[in-house]
Image (tube, rainbow, N blue to C red):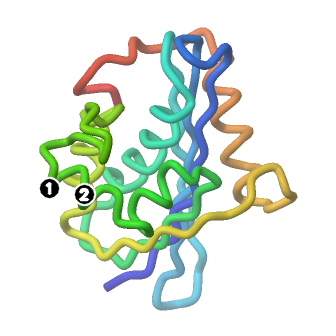
Amino acid sequence: MMRVELYSDGAARGNPDGPGGFGCVLRYEDSKGTLHEKEISRGYKKTTNNRMELLGVIAGLEALNRPCDVFVYSDSKYVTDSFNKHWIENWKNNGWKTAGKKPVMNDDLWKRLLKAMEPHKVVYEWVKGHNGHDLNERCDRLATSAADSEDLLDDITGGMI
């Protein structure tokens, strides 16, 4: 399978319920050693930072047209820890409830993310945000530019991208 690096970031102004956006960069090297990159970003009217963090990863995975080995790099512990600490497995097993029996926030996006992951082998890695990591900074610029744009969508369940 092709190895893909997915860098992602989310942003929200006036979190929660202010405008927000996500940015992601997909990178892969073809068999001739040529690096290919694709940027994806989008802004929403009223949203949260966590929703944008999730949507960045979702958008990147949904853009892939064949099964891949995907390495997701995110500065969101909310995203990376959910998989690396197996929180998502517990949420699913508990009917999308937390250990404290409260509904899981953003379950619509978690379910969409799991669906987007299905054809791929996905590894999540945390990177420290705003620490000079070129691709994380690039995703941050994409996300904030999307949040500040005039062309904002409503953040509703389904069909957001």
The residue under the point 75% across, 52% down is 129
The residue under the point 24% across, 57% down is 90
The residue under the point 42% across, 52% down is 60
Q: Nearer the viewer, residue 27 or 123?
A: 123
The x, y position of residue 94, in whole percent, is: 16, 49
The residue under the point 48% across, 82% down is 30
Q: Nearer the viewer, residue 96 or 112?
A: 96
Query: Could you classify mark 1 by the number of other residues whose Cα lies within 10 Å: few (under 14), some (14-19), or many (20 or more)?
Result: few
The x, y position of residue 130, in whole percent, is: 82, 49
Residue that sits furthest to the bottom in the current view:
32
The x, y position of residue 10, in whole percent, is: 59, 38
Instruction: Give the secondary structure at mark 1.
Output: helix
Tell me whether circle 2 and circle 1 mark residues in contact (CB < 8 Å). Answer: yes
Q: Toward which corner of the image does residue 132 lie, by quadrant?
A: bottom right
Instruction: Give the secondary structure at mark 2.
Output: helix
Residue type at the position of mark 1: Asn
Q: Nearer the viewer, residue 53 or 31?
A: 53
Horizontal side of residue 130 vs 139, given as left or right: right
Q: Toward which corner of the image does residue 34 lie, by quadrant?
A: bottom right
- Looking at the figure, which quarter contains the N terminus? bottom left
Q: Which residue is mark 2?
A: 90
How far apart in space, not on screen, are marks 2 and 1 (Cα)?
Answer: 5 Å
Q: Which numbered dot is residue 111?
A: none
The x, y position of residue 149, in whole percent, is: 64, 16
Rendered position, 81 above or below 29:
above
Q: Which residue is mark 1?
A: 93
- Looking at the figure, which quarter contains the C terminus? top left
Horizontal side of residue 27 vs 158, given as left or right: right
